[in-house]
Amino acid sequence: MRITGTFIDEISHDIPHQNWGREEWDRDFAHMKAIGIDTVILIRSGYRRFITYPSAWLQDQYGCYQPPVDLVEMYLQLAEKHGLKFYFGLYDSGKYWDTGVMQHEIDANRYVIDEVWQKYGHYSSFAGWYLSMEISRQTKGAASAFRILGEQCKGVSGGLPTFISPWIDGKKAVMAASSNLTKNDVVSLEQHETEWNEIFHEIHTSVDAVAFQDGHIDYHELEDFFTINKKLADKYNMQCWTNAESFDRDMPIKFLPIKFEKLKLKLDAARRAGYDKAITFEFSHFMSPQSAYLQAGHLYNRYKEYIETL
């Protein structure tokens, strides 16, 4: 199972910012292309007051800061240069995390979707949309938000694909700010299947693919959950991707590049389950030869050796 897509986390909410400019990003896109990555996904176009493109509306309505560089335009241009597809990730106001009310994210993104397509829709590399609200269970209002925003994304862009990347509520699904590595209150296979059957039923006409994050369950649990995910996706005619996390959730230091053996276990489980595509969070920090983490370049080398055997 080859990794063919990666998120780009330039807002860097809970991982360090690498302070790259266009030259460094240009090199990174080349490194991605060299190992078969064909898709880059902006994980979010903004988080609270920090944004990736100069949106007058977000600055006025949400008090966002003027970004020094239009990162969305830069990524689209570099994607065109290197022959990659670019997916735009929606804005995260942070208000859902504060209030539990998903309507805030719908309201914020109604304008963002139209604004972004008007500004950047002419780029040939603009290939789709990422609905950036992260959930794991039957979160109140989440399915409706995915459906409403997915319909709008498709409507303005002539039907370009949309996808989501939820997490599985397993034993490693703890808050990043917590010192704990595991928890006891976890979802069962039966609960997971029931809840996601209901969610898929509501969203399948406006969401084309689901890429479950693979890092919140133990390695011996992967195949059982992956089999359920693929069965549900097939039932609703959705693409089933895996978000193969390239950082390690098993260590007290959050977050460092993952041990290659663990990444291989996860990719092999996705292959056995018949998944359609593997993406990762997140190449530039955790797999790139020019990452601030020295271990990331070694992971890149081990992964290259691995795919040469496939």
Image (spheres, rainbow, N blue to C red):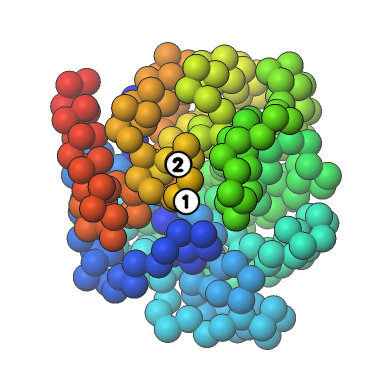
Report the number of discs. 2
Residue 39 visible? The answer is no
Say which of 226 and 72 sits in front: 226
Labels 1 and 2 touching (C-beta < 8 A): yes
Q: Nearer the viewer, residue 208 or 186?
A: 186
**As displayed, is residue 153 above or below residue 49?**
above
Callout 1: helix, strand or loop?
Answer: loop
**Amino acid at pointer 2:** Met
Give neighbour class at mark 1: few <14, some 14-19, many 20+ (Cα, 10 Å): some
Q: Which residue is mark 2?
A: 251
| Type of the residue with mark 1 | Lys
Label 2: few (<14), some (14–19) or many (≥20) C-alpha neighbours in 10 Å: few
What secondary structure is marked by label 2? loop
Q: Is residue 109 left or right of residue 38?
A: right
Residue 108 in view: yes
Which residue corresponds to the image point at 77% horizontal and 62% vertical from the top-left? 98
- Work out whether residue 184 or residue 37 is closer to the camera in this orientation and state it: 184
For the N terminus, the quadrant is top left
User: Which quadrant of the figure contains the C terminus?
Assistant: top left
Residue 284 x, y percent position in the rendering: 33, 54
Residue assigned mark 1: 254
Left or right: 175 in relation to 273: right
Q: Quadrant of residue 47?
A: bottom right
In the rendered image, the vertical position of residue 270 relative to residue 291, given as above or below: above
Residue shown at the point (53%, 25%) measured from the top left: 218
Q: Position of residue 299 (x, y in %)?
A: 25, 40
